[in-house]
Image (tube, rainbow, N blue to C red):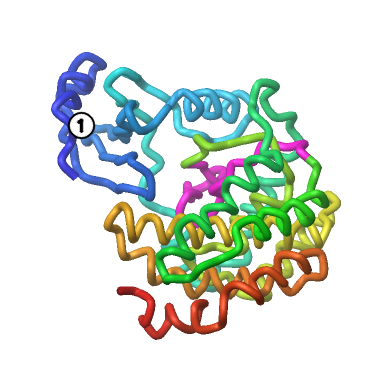
Amino acid sequence: MIPPATAMPFLAANGWGDGTILPLAGDASFRRYFRVAAPGRTAVLMDAPPEHEDSRPFLAVAAHLRSTGFAAPQVFATDLDAGLILLEDFGDDRVAEAVALDPSREAKIYGDAVDLLLRLHSVPPPADLPPYDRAVYQREAGLFTEWYGPAVDLPVDVEAYVSAWNTVLAQVTERSVLVLRDYHAENIMLREGQDLALLDFQDALTGHPAYDLVSLLQDARRDVSAATEASMLARYRSSRPLDDAAYAILGAQRNAKILGIFTRLWKRDGKPRYLSLQPRVWRYLERDLAHPALAPVKAWFDRNVPVEKRAAAWTAGTLAT
């Protein structure tokens, strides 16, 4: 977490030359984040190397969210050639840590997060935002066969996998809302007396309203209680229709994708810490696959991925070699 050489000149050119750069966080991409602490104020410096990351979608979605009344970070300065963006600092009070410290807050905080989604889904998405369509769903689901299978020495029938998903995804055609695509407890900030604030939405697309609910309630990084998941789905349905099949289909698609991504982070990027999250994701996936709407995909998993290559093996550590 050493800032790039261009960071201090960038800060100096934009009125933050008196700031000290402190490490803040990295994520599963090439982006890194630093806190800039200056007398009486702070900001967040995003380092998104342009050879790996296109920050223009982030800026466009941030502008849309702010213009429609949502708490996305204000952009103070940009240098896209250097991959640097200076952002409003929402502090350190993430939903994930807040609920871990006080589990009794889970229902209230998650209720607020669902209400935020209901508000978001009542606002038309940006007209020029690309669709979250079947081609994207397939490309993402394909990360499972591309990375997970080879990593655990598992020969799989890729053609049948694609065919099974084609059949299932034909049931999920609605693309009516802005989908943030990574709406979970580590990307939602608490602010005293204010609305929840949003982070990490640069991959947003126009898609199905069930997707961000899955992201929130089938969180790869923390266990959401079954009671909370059920009550939050009921809360959403009290204001807007939500199809059980769509929730299960997009849950299975997302969790298959995450298993592929976490395996890629381990094998390609040298980030083995993501292995510890695999069992939870497998549990979500197997639960989603039990829905009748997922029958073709479930049949493929039953034929191609034996039990000993699933969650139990990750829990025992037998596959993390």
Quadrant assignment for the N terminus: top left
Q: Is residue 307 left or right of residue 41?
A: right
Q: Which three-letter amino acid code belongs to the residue tagged 1? A: Ala
Residue at image position (59%, 53%) is: 141
How many marks the image carries: the answer is 1
Kindly indicate the quadrant of the structure image that contains residue 179.
top right
Q: Nearer the viewer, residue 7 or 80?
A: 80
Residue at image position (65%, 46%) is: 137
Residue 318 x/y as whole percent: 37, 82
> Which span of residues is magenta-colored?
175-199
Q: Nearer the viewer, residue 197 or 195?
A: 197
Q: Nearer the viewer, residue 293 or 38?
A: 293
Residue 283 x/y as whole percent: 58, 75
Q: Is residue 86 above or below residue 162?
A: above
Residue at image position (57%, 74%) is: 305
Kind of element beneath mark 1: strand
Residue 2 x/y as whole percent: 15, 41
Residue 28 x/y as whole percent: 38, 50
Kindly indicate the quadrant of the structure image that contains residue 257.
bottom right
- Whether residue 49 is visible to the viewer of this picture, yes or no, is yes
> Which residue position is annotated with label 1?
38
Q: Is residue 186 magenta?
A: yes
